[in-house]
Amino acid sequence: MTNIATRKSVMTLYSSPTCVLSHCARFVLQEKSIAAEIEFYDPQNPPKELLADNQRCAESDENPRGISPTLIERDLVLYDSRIIMEYLDERFPHPPLHQMDPVSRANARMLIKRIDQDWYQLLDDILFTGEKKSAKAKKSLRESLLEAAPIFAARPYFMSDEFSLIDCVITPLLWRMPSIGIDLTSAPDDVINKYAQRMFKRPAFARSLSDIEMDMAELPK
């Protein structure tokens, strides 16, 4: 049977319109101006051919993100957001979103892993668990972000003087803070929101938003 990988002649990103991990991948696509199709779908009812290729279940309590995002390019099928982001950066090296030296790249990967473990896991708990656990996670996420305020203030980008994949990971997370009721204005000199506004002003970020995500916060004018 012909599957989705063999049918697609152009790069295609299958994306939930609300999945923060999909949003990260879309942000990278737009930053690099990659010619690719973005196909939004309902995670509760993903295309059958996508399920067959991905071999992952639709969204559920055990797997709240389902199979989003999935990148298809000819015979290549990738379904992990961070792997997709790395692949896009290597496949389309200009502009680079990773430092070129191995030590800096390894450090950036470790930092992204830490962000996923510390902040993204809490976001999952807020969105996909019961009221009590969600409230606790919301408090923890707010406190953890505020504790990182000196890092946001130290350099133009997150722990870097240049825009990188790390910013592509953090910015979609911060975009969702108003929609889940987390206020970060108490950070010294409002440094977290100032960082966020700089990232939100990037044309690529505006292009990365789905219609539903547009309603989660407000783009700076």
Image (tube, rainbow, N blue to C red):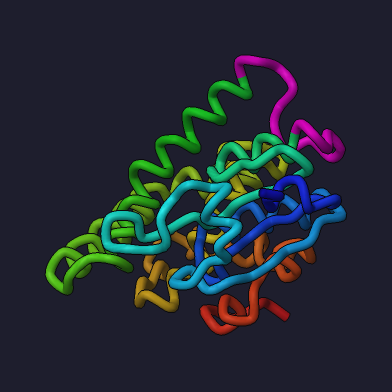
Find out whether residue 1 is within the magenta segment.
no
Q: Position of residue 129 (x, y in %)?
A: 22, 66
Q: Position of residue 197 (x, y in %)?
A: 62, 67
The number of numbered discs placed on residues in the rendered structure image is 0
Q: Quadrant of the C terminus?
A: bottom right
Which image quadrant is residue 99 in?
Answer: top right
Give the magenta part as a residue range: 90-103
Work out whether residue 103 can be spotted.
yes
Which image quadrant is residue 177 in?
Answer: bottom left
Q: Residue at x 35, y 77 (%)?
A: 181
Q: In the current view of this chain or complex, which residue is farthest to the front?
A: 1
Q: Residue at x 75, y 53 (%)?
A: 29
Query: As drawn, is 151 to the left or to the right of 73?
Result: left
Work out whether residue 195 can be spotted.
no
- Residue 39 or residue 108, whichever sits in front: 39
- Check the image and report above or below for 66 versus 45: above
Q: Residue at x 83, y 38 (%)?
A: 92
Q: In the current view of this chain or complex, which residue is farthest to the bottom?
A: 215
- Check the image and report above or below for 20 versus 147: below
Query: As drawn, is 160 to the left or to the right of 185?
Result: right
Q: Position of residue 108 (x, y in %)?
A: 56, 30
Majority SS type along the magenta span = loop
